[in-house]
Image (spheres, coloured by chain):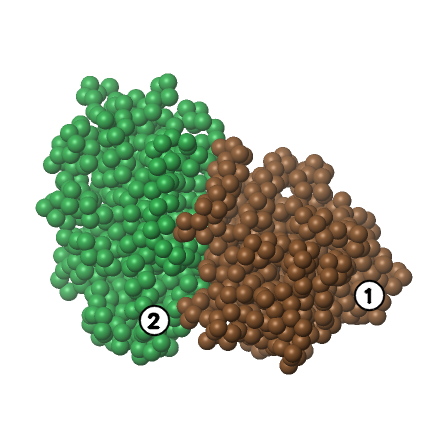
Amino acid sequence: MSASRYDAIIVGGGHNGLVTAAYLAMAGKKVLVLEKRHVLGGAAVTEEINPGFKYSVCSYVVSLLRPEIIRDLELPKHGLQILPLESTFTPLPNGDYLARWGDHDQTRREIYRHSPRDADAYDDFGKLMYQLAVAVKPILAMVPPDPTSMSPKDLMGFLRLGKHFRGLGHEQFHALHKLMTMSSADYLDEWFETEALKATMSSSGIIGTFLGPRSPGTAYVLLHHYMGEIDGAMRAWGFAKGGTGSVSESIASAARGHGAEIMTEAGVAEVTVKNGRTTGVVLDDGREYSSSVVVSGLDPKRTFLDLVDAKELPGDFVRDIERFKIRGSSGKVNLSLSELPNFTAKPGVGPLHKGAVSISPSIDYLERAYDEAKYGDFSSRPYMDIIMPSMIDAGMAPPGKHVMSIFVQYAPSDLRGGWNETKREAFGDAVVDTLAQYAPNLPDAILHRQVLTPWDIDRDMGLTDGNIFHGELSLHQLFCMRPTVGYADYTTPLRGYYQAGSGTHPGGGITGASGRLAALEILKGALR
Amino acid sequence: MSASYDTVVIGAGHNGLVTAAYLAKAGQKVLVLEQREVVGGAAATEEIFPGFKVDTGAHRIGGLSGAVVKDLALAGHGLELLEAEVTAFLPVIEGTPLTLWRDPRKTADAIRKISPPDADAWVPFTELVGKAASFLEAAWTSTPPDVTGTDLGDLMATAKLGMKLRRFGKRDMVEIMRILPMSVYELLGDWFESDLVKGAIAASAVSGLCQGPMGAGTVYTLLHHHVGAGQGVIRPTRRVRGGIGRLSEALAAACKAAGVEVRTGASVERIMVEGRTAVGVVVDGAEVRAQRVVSSADPRRTFFELMDPTEMAPEFARKVGNIRYRGVCAKVHLALSGLPDFACRPGEGNHLAGVISISPSLEYIERAFDAAKYGRVSERPYLEVSIASLADPSVTPNGKHLMSIVFQYAPYALQDGEWDDAARAKLGDVAIETLAEYAPNVASLVEAQHVLTPLDLEREYGLAEGNVYHGEMTLDQLLFMRPVPGASRYRAPTAGLYLCGAGTHPGGGVTGVPGFNAAREILKD
């Protein structure tokens, strides 16, 4: 047993865990972070799996990282540099394409080429989304109150929330209600007619969900696209120089700067509990560390069903966590390339290669991809969101060579008959075949291929069922219900045990918001 | 110029009649104008085949308001409700079929043959549905509050609903909040393992909806169909003796008793608006003036066909234009020489007395829905089959039987082709083929067949896009969003114009609640 005692132990060195560590350390607490893998970041890592080629293995874009975290932790000083990712290029099966460029007028002309009506609607839509993003922001930044509690703190929370909604006025409130409950396809149908535009926009509503664009509840995530903040400027997506791992590295560096101790290859086997209160952790190798505060950055299933003995928790709570929905639906393919893809729709190397490429030609296309997954197969013609990091940051690949990051949907975690190596490669083949329809030179340019299915993401990254958001972002799992009512304030039924991962409000994406809010609650609670 | 009235009601659907009766009882002079020759709208019984009294639209009633039945003395006007001990029968091609009973313990016993854990879960599940539906019922009868407003009455109403929820106790309150926005697929995954049990329940959740059971919000529709069902009852099946048209006739009789004038075969051409106020209607070329106009037609018809878009704010017109209808139900009526004989449960018996639900699994329903997403008719549809002649021999000639089938999914907008005679006949064949997989003798029993496609429902009953609920029952089109914000409290933006149809809160089904609520609001003004 280690003699050193810590004020808090953080289980999991994912970006949220690191944010919590940094905030606690900044407040003068003695903090220990324990990460199972050899590299920090969880799903936000850069790894050189093929020598010379750097992959942002899982998460690949940054947009939602809270600006207050960037400021508070002085992340740019610790190496964070976000490069803009401005355009989205959607090649179409008929040889045409739809592009949205960084330049507003250019985008407008391009949309006008497809539909003059849509070009007008695009600006109005953007304005409304911007307003709604502003309206939602304060909610994302608040600790959800408990609807069953009569405590003044919780009642005040709801009062504040009520006031906020009332303050929005009719129009915005109703628009927000529609956004929260509609399908992205229906929502966009009210505005646009161009299939490729609707499909590409709706794709941001389905990322990470086990839903199709026609499923109610997908419209809400459209907002995220407008909530991206880079140094305070809304609406832009970015790529972290050095890959997504550098986001984690910079947070870790900030945490260390404030005195936090961070250990890798230190997997936690168990959180120890005595008399309803946490006493520390036991590692896989038997080492023990004691602390009266333990914070889990893992998803709710692992946090409560794996790390803790179920009999230490109330039965109702365990049942709530057991039925918390966490199906995984996405995979990732990372490629090392000898040359850039040459798109039939727009031949040659151009600005499109510096932005995102979206394989989302129509709503029906996305919906069909979803249909296959509903019944347990991976999509034979999947939705893909592609970037070529080496075109944004030359350091990601050797000179003249390139890396390509492909986010793929749908790959169900509960694949019929289960995942294995053969099916993983078949999934990788479906991705390459689909892409080759738009860029025929691609298959021959591949030097190395890494395929991650939900099965791999679960096993390697520790995300249950490979769900990239630590739990589905559906209405009944948001805000005061994330992960379950009564424990949406980062506390748990065990005293001293906290949760800080994406399975808590506001969840999902590299936001750091959960980690920060958890730290602030801990500083008001156990470490006051 | 004709006589003037306090109120003219457009449409003698059941909601229009309910509103008219209440207003007349309060002393108003009321005229109801119905385009068809019979009252009832989509709650009508018609002799399509000689001697067969067919419920051509709805064939069972949902959460019919007890207050309406009592206040309007409908029993005295001839309404008699029939309720079978069996609510639904779920045939299967292979394996053990399932019968759902009004008594949940009997159902649990039936499920035990299929899955013991599901049998154990059944009664607690029905209790949850019962509690959640009773919460919904409280919301049904109150006018949707203006959430962003400051009206004290509204705040009180919202607070009352909140208190109702709290009274269930912490655990149930949280559970009801949690399940309301869910998909029925997710909910059933929490409770059951058997495909058949899930299919039995999920079918009710998608009824009339252009969504599959995997669509979010389908738990809400499940609960909607269980309001007033009675404790422990899943898939309530209540019919009206003599056909559902008898309900409409009883309502018409109650109207007449209260002094309402009901005119059938009277087609309203437009709502007259003078100085931004509705002052009457034009019916068959003649003006009928009234203090107020109440429309039980759906919002599209009310605002776009009976009015001119220039008579409303562009923003309002845009919202009305965005209402989704997407009818997905067709009706198939079969005159049968005998009863269907199900291979999985041969012979006659009370299993046929409720509805027969062709929904052997949740996946089956979802696949049926997939077709509709791409504008195709399901090759293997979800069918809700009702043999009215079993409980009520008065609806058919001696020894004959009548089968009424709700066929889902048949999308209003077809991707290829249109709803012509060939498509109509094909749909009837698919229904019979599907049924024959379970009851092979069906095809040989058919003496006559009649099909109503969504397009027929639109043309015949004035239901936009054939949507039986006057607008999709999805979370974004409910409560204060129904039919659109700004008209969700039964008042249109045009002064003197009110809405009382299923397009208003709480929505579709033969409930009478929109009509009841509308009358209350009108009498407040």
- Give the vertical position of B381 relative to A327 (above or below): below
Q: Residues within 10 Å of mark 1 (few under 14, many from 20)?
A: many
In the image, what residue occupies the spot 70% across and 36% down? B105
Identity of the amino acid at label 1? Answer: Phe
Disc 1 versus disc 2: distance between alpha carbons?
Answer: 54 Å
Q: Quadrant of residue B262?
A: bottom right
Q: Determine which of the numbered discs, if any, sits on residue B52 in the image.
A: 1
Give the percent coordinates (x, y) of residue A489. 34, 35
Give the percent coordinates (x, y) of residue B361. 61, 51
Give the percent coordinates (x, y) of residue A68. 19, 45
Identity of the amino acid at label 2? Answer: Ala
**Chain that appears green:** A
Q: Tell me the quarter of the image containing the N terminus of chain B.
A: bottom right
Tag 2, which chain?
A: A
Viewer-proximal residue, A419 or B179?
Answer: B179
SS label for mark 1: loop
**Chain that appears brown:** B
Q: Determine which of the numbered discs, if any, sits on residue A121 in the image.
A: 2
Q: Tell me the quarter of the image containing the C terminus of chain B.
A: bottom right
